[in-house]
Amino acid sequence: MAVAQKTRYRWLDVLRGAAVVNMVAFHFCYDWFEVFARLPGWYFLWPSRLWQQAICCTFILTAGFSAGLGRRALRHGLVLNLCGFAVSAVTLLALPSEAVFFGVLNLLGCSVLLVWALRPALEKLPAVPGLCVSLVLFALTRHLPEGYLGFLGLWRMELPAGLYRWNALAFLGLPGPTFTSSDYFPLAPWFFLFLAGWFFCRLARPRLEGFLPRLSCPPLEWVGRHSLGIYLIHQPVCMAVCLLLDL
Protein backbone atom coordinates (compact mmCIF):
# COMPACT_ATOMS: atom_id res chain seq x y z
CA MET A 1 0.00 0.00 0.00
CA ALA A 2 2.84 2.42 0.79
CA VAL A 3 4.33 1.92 -2.67
CA ALA A 4 0.98 2.47 -4.38
CA GLN A 5 0.39 5.66 -2.42
CA LYS A 6 3.83 6.99 -3.36
CA THR A 7 3.32 6.22 -7.04
CA ARG A 8 -0.22 7.55 -7.11
CA TYR A 9 0.75 11.05 -5.99
CA ARG A 10 4.10 11.49 -7.72
CA TRP A 11 2.52 14.30 -9.73
CA LEU A 12 2.11 16.28 -6.50
CA ASP A 13 5.87 16.09 -5.91
CA VAL A 14 6.41 17.22 -9.51
CA LEU A 15 4.27 20.33 -8.99
CA ARG A 16 5.90 21.09 -5.66
CA GLY A 17 9.35 20.52 -7.14
CA ALA A 18 8.64 22.90 -10.01
CA ALA A 19 7.54 25.53 -7.50
CA VAL A 20 10.75 25.03 -5.49
CA VAL A 21 12.96 25.43 -8.57
CA ASN A 22 11.13 28.64 -9.47
CA MET A 23 11.39 29.86 -5.87
CA VAL A 24 15.17 29.39 -5.82
CA ALA A 25 15.51 31.17 -9.16
CA PHE A 26 13.27 34.02 -8.01
CA HIS A 27 15.13 34.53 -4.74
CA PHE A 28 18.48 34.50 -6.52
CA CYS A 29 17.18 37.23 -8.83
CA TYR A 30 15.84 39.17 -5.84
CA ASP A 31 19.17 38.95 -4.03
CA TRP A 32 21.16 39.97 -7.10
CA PHE A 33 18.90 42.76 -8.33
CA GLU A 34 17.60 44.17 -5.04
CA VAL A 35 19.95 43.25 -2.18
CA PHE A 36 23.06 43.75 -4.32
CA ALA A 37 21.38 46.69 -6.10
CA ARG A 38 22.07 45.47 -9.64
CA LEU A 39 18.59 46.50 -10.75
CA PRO A 40 16.75 48.38 -7.98
CA GLY A 41 13.00 48.21 -8.41
CA TRP A 42 13.11 44.82 -10.15
CA TYR A 43 10.85 43.35 -7.47
CA PHE A 44 8.08 45.82 -8.31
CA LEU A 45 8.02 45.12 -12.05
CA TRP A 46 4.81 43.35 -13.04
CA PRO A 47 6.55 40.25 -14.50
CA SER A 48 8.46 39.84 -11.22
CA ARG A 49 5.30 40.20 -9.16
CA LEU A 50 3.42 37.76 -11.42
CA TRP A 51 6.26 35.24 -11.13
CA GLN A 52 6.29 35.56 -7.35
CA GLN A 53 2.53 35.21 -7.00
CA ALA A 54 2.45 32.14 -9.25
CA ILE A 55 5.10 30.47 -7.07
CA CYS A 56 3.28 31.39 -3.84
CA CYS A 57 -0.11 30.20 -5.04
CA THR A 58 1.32 26.90 -6.31
CA PHE A 59 3.10 26.27 -3.01
CA ILE A 60 0.10 27.06 -0.84
CA LEU A 61 -2.46 25.20 -2.94
CA THR A 62 -0.30 22.06 -3.11
CA ALA A 63 0.33 22.31 0.64
CA GLY A 64 -3.41 22.47 1.25
CA PHE A 65 -3.97 19.52 -1.07
CA SER A 66 -1.26 17.56 0.75
CA ALA A 67 -2.92 18.34 4.09
CA GLY A 68 -5.95 16.46 2.80
CA LEU A 69 -3.79 13.37 2.24
CA GLY A 70 -1.31 13.48 5.05
CA ARG A 71 -1.08 12.12 8.54
CA ARG A 72 0.82 13.38 11.59
CA ALA A 73 -0.62 16.85 11.00
CA LEU A 74 0.15 18.05 14.53
CA ARG A 75 3.81 17.09 14.25
CA HIS A 76 4.09 18.52 10.73
CA GLY A 77 2.52 21.82 11.74
CA LEU A 78 4.80 22.20 14.76
CA VAL A 79 7.93 21.40 12.70
CA LEU A 80 7.00 23.96 10.05
CA ASN A 81 6.45 26.62 12.70
CA LEU A 82 9.75 25.85 14.43
CA CYS A 83 11.54 26.12 11.09
CA GLY A 84 9.75 29.40 10.45
CA PHE A 85 10.87 30.78 13.81
CA ALA A 86 14.43 29.67 13.02
CA VAL A 87 14.33 31.53 9.70
CA SER A 88 13.11 34.65 11.50
CA ALA A 89 15.91 34.44 14.06
CA VAL A 90 18.67 33.84 11.51
CA THR A 91 17.56 36.60 9.13
CA LEU A 92 17.13 39.05 12.00
CA LEU A 93 20.70 38.40 13.16
CA ALA A 94 22.39 38.04 9.77
CA LEU A 95 20.57 40.63 7.67
CA PRO A 96 18.19 42.78 9.76
CA SER A 97 17.04 44.82 6.76
CA GLU A 98 15.73 41.60 5.15
CA ALA A 99 14.39 39.93 8.31
CA VAL A 100 11.47 37.53 7.89
CA PHE A 101 8.48 37.69 10.22
CA PHE A 102 5.55 35.32 9.67
CA GLY A 103 6.88 34.03 6.38
CA VAL A 104 5.57 31.18 4.32
CA LEU A 105 6.75 28.46 6.74
CA ASN A 106 4.81 29.96 9.63
CA LEU A 107 1.79 30.39 7.38
CA LEU A 108 1.91 26.73 6.33
CA GLY A 109 2.57 25.55 9.88
CA CYS A 110 -0.35 27.51 11.32
CA SER A 111 -2.60 26.47 8.42
CA VAL A 112 -1.82 22.79 8.99
CA LEU A 113 -2.59 23.18 12.71
CA LEU A 114 -5.82 25.07 12.04
CA VAL A 115 -7.08 22.44 9.60
CA TRP A 116 -6.07 19.71 12.06
CA ALA A 117 -8.04 21.41 14.84
CA LEU A 118 -11.05 22.23 12.65
CA ARG A 119 -11.09 19.00 10.65
CA PRO A 120 -14.15 17.43 12.35
CA ALA A 121 -16.19 20.52 11.47
CA LEU A 122 -14.65 21.02 8.01
CA GLU A 123 -15.37 17.43 6.98
CA LYS A 124 -19.08 18.03 7.56
CA LEU A 125 -19.08 20.73 4.87
CA PRO A 126 -19.71 19.76 1.23
CA ALA A 127 -16.50 20.01 -0.80
CA VAL A 128 -17.79 22.18 -3.67
CA PRO A 129 -19.34 24.94 -1.49
CA GLY A 130 -16.29 24.78 0.79
CA LEU A 131 -13.95 25.28 -2.16
CA CYS A 132 -16.02 28.14 -3.57
CA VAL A 133 -16.36 29.94 -0.22
CA SER A 134 -12.62 29.56 0.44
CA LEU A 135 -11.76 31.12 -2.93
CA VAL A 136 -14.23 33.97 -2.40
CA LEU A 137 -12.79 34.69 1.06
CA PHE A 138 -9.28 34.65 -0.43
CA ALA A 139 -10.33 37.19 -3.05
CA LEU A 140 -12.15 39.38 -0.50
CA THR A 141 -9.20 39.50 1.92
CA ARG A 142 -6.45 39.60 -0.72
CA HIS A 143 -5.60 43.20 0.18
CA LEU A 144 -6.41 43.07 3.90
CA PRO A 145 -2.76 43.78 4.85
CA GLU A 146 -2.97 46.92 2.70
CA GLY A 147 -5.98 48.24 4.62
CA TYR A 148 -9.02 47.26 2.60
CA LEU A 149 -11.31 44.47 1.46
CA GLY A 150 -12.15 44.04 -2.20
CA PHE A 151 -13.28 41.65 -4.88
CA LEU A 152 -11.32 41.33 -8.13
CA GLY A 153 -11.13 45.11 -8.51
CA LEU A 154 -14.92 45.39 -8.74
CA TRP A 155 -15.56 46.47 -5.16
CA ARG A 156 -13.49 48.02 -2.40
CA MET A 157 -14.09 48.84 1.27
CA GLU A 158 -11.51 50.72 3.32
CA LEU A 159 -11.03 49.39 6.86
CA PRO A 160 -10.59 51.50 10.02
CA ALA A 161 -6.99 52.53 10.65
CA GLY A 162 -7.44 51.44 14.26
CA LEU A 163 -7.23 47.82 13.14
CA TYR A 164 -3.63 48.38 12.08
CA ARG A 165 -2.13 49.77 15.30
CA TRP A 166 -0.31 46.72 16.63
CA ASN A 167 2.47 44.76 14.95
CA ALA A 168 1.44 41.77 17.08
CA LEU A 169 -1.63 41.34 14.83
CA ALA A 170 0.46 41.12 11.65
CA PHE A 171 0.04 37.33 11.56
CA LEU A 172 -3.71 37.86 11.03
CA GLY A 173 -3.15 40.25 8.13
CA LEU A 174 -3.35 43.45 10.22
CA PRO A 175 0.24 44.75 10.29
CA GLY A 176 1.09 47.76 12.41
CA PRO A 177 2.60 50.95 10.96
CA THR A 178 6.20 49.91 11.70
CA PHE A 179 5.89 46.25 10.66
CA THR A 180 8.29 45.06 7.95
CA SER A 181 9.08 41.59 6.63
CA SER A 182 10.90 40.45 3.51
CA ASP A 183 8.68 37.35 3.34
CA TYR A 184 5.19 38.02 4.70
CA PHE A 185 2.28 35.59 4.40
CA PRO A 186 -0.45 36.40 6.95
CA LEU A 187 -3.32 34.03 7.66
CA ALA A 188 -5.67 36.38 5.83
CA PRO A 189 -5.76 35.99 2.89
CA TRP A 190 -3.43 33.01 2.49
CA PHE A 191 -5.08 30.53 4.86
CA PHE A 192 -8.17 30.64 2.65
CA LEU A 193 -6.08 29.59 -0.37
CA PHE A 194 -4.61 26.74 1.69
CA LEU A 195 -8.15 25.76 2.67
CA ALA A 196 -9.18 25.84 -0.99
CA GLY A 197 -6.43 23.30 -1.70
CA TRP A 198 -7.72 21.12 1.14
CA PHE A 199 -11.29 21.19 -0.17
CA PHE A 200 -10.02 20.59 -3.72
CA CYS A 201 -8.29 17.46 -2.45
CA ARG A 202 -11.58 16.16 -1.07
CA LEU A 203 -13.33 16.96 -4.32
CA ALA A 204 -10.73 15.84 -6.85
CA ARG A 205 -8.87 12.99 -5.16
CA PRO A 206 -11.12 10.19 -6.44
CA ARG A 207 -11.05 11.67 -9.96
CA LEU A 208 -7.28 12.24 -10.09
CA GLU A 209 -6.26 8.76 -8.99
CA GLY A 210 -6.46 7.36 -12.49
CA PHE A 211 -5.66 10.52 -14.43
CA LEU A 212 -2.41 12.11 -13.21
CA PRO A 213 -0.20 9.21 -12.07
CA ARG A 214 1.58 9.27 -15.45
CA LEU A 215 2.89 12.78 -14.77
CA SER A 216 6.44 11.98 -13.74
CA CYS A 217 9.79 13.77 -13.61
CA PRO A 218 12.26 12.12 -11.21
CA PRO A 219 14.46 15.22 -10.64
CA LEU A 220 11.44 17.39 -9.79
CA GLU A 221 9.96 14.60 -7.68
CA TRP A 222 13.16 14.51 -5.63
CA VAL A 223 13.11 18.28 -5.20
CA GLY A 224 9.44 18.16 -4.21
CA ARG A 225 10.05 15.49 -1.58
CA HIS A 226 12.87 17.56 -0.05
CA SER A 227 11.22 20.96 -0.37
CA LEU A 228 11.55 21.93 3.31
CA GLY A 229 15.27 21.23 3.48
CA ILE A 230 15.89 23.05 0.21
CA TYR A 231 13.87 26.01 1.43
CA LEU A 232 15.94 26.26 4.60
CA ILE A 233 19.31 26.30 2.80
CA HIS A 234 18.52 27.97 -0.52
CA GLN A 235 18.75 31.59 0.61
CA PRO A 236 22.24 31.30 2.18
CA VAL A 237 23.37 29.50 -0.98
CA CYS A 238 21.89 32.22 -3.20
CA MET A 239 23.57 34.92 -1.12
CA ALA A 240 26.90 33.08 -1.28
CA VAL A 241 26.68 32.83 -5.07
CA CYS A 242 25.85 36.54 -5.29
CA LEU A 243 28.86 37.37 -3.10
CA LEU A 244 31.12 35.33 -5.39
CA LEU A 245 29.73 37.03 -8.49
CA ASP A 246 30.20 40.41 -6.85
CA LEU A 247 33.93 39.90 -6.23
Image: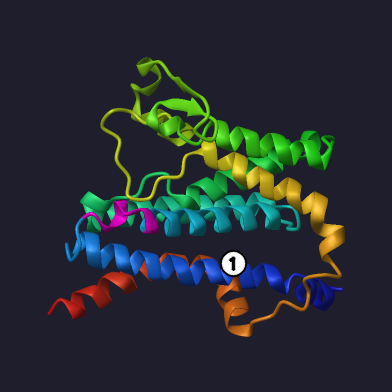
Residue nearest the viewer, comparing 189 with 86? 189
- Residue named by callout 1: 16
Q: What kind of colouring is applied to the model shown?
A: rainbow
User: In this picture, which residue range is highlighted in magenta?
Assistant: 41-47
- Where is residue 121? Give x, y as percent: 79, 33
Q: Main secondary structure of the magenta part?
A: helix
Residue nearest the viewer, comparing 220 with 40? 40
Residue drawn at x 22%, y 56% as measured from the top left: 95
Of all residues, the one furthest to the front in this rendering is 154
Whether 54 is drawn above or below 155: the answer is below
Of all residues, the one furthest to the left in this rendering is 247
Q: Quadrant of the C terminus?
A: bottom left
- Per the image, is 98 magenta? no
- Per the image, is 43 magenta? yes
Quadrant of the image occupied by residue 140: top right
- Where is residue 183? Give x, y as percent: 38, 50
Whether 101 is drawn above or below 246: the answer is above
Residue drawn at x 42%, y 50% as measured from the top left: 85
- Where is residue 32? Give x, y as percent: 24, 68
Residue drawn at x 27%, y 64% as measured from the top left: 31
Q: Amino acid at mark 1?
A: Arg
Q: Few, some or many C-alpha atoms within 10 Å of disc 1 (few <14, some 14-19, many ≥20)?
A: many
Q: Is residue 202 left or right of residue 25?
A: right
Q: Secondary structure at mark 1?
A: helix
Residue nearest the viewer, comparing 68 with 88? 68
Q: Is residue 144 left or right of residue 28?
A: right
Residue nearest the viewer, comparing 97 with 207? 207
- Where is residue 109? Give x, y as percent: 56, 49
Q: Quadrant of the N terminus?
A: bottom right
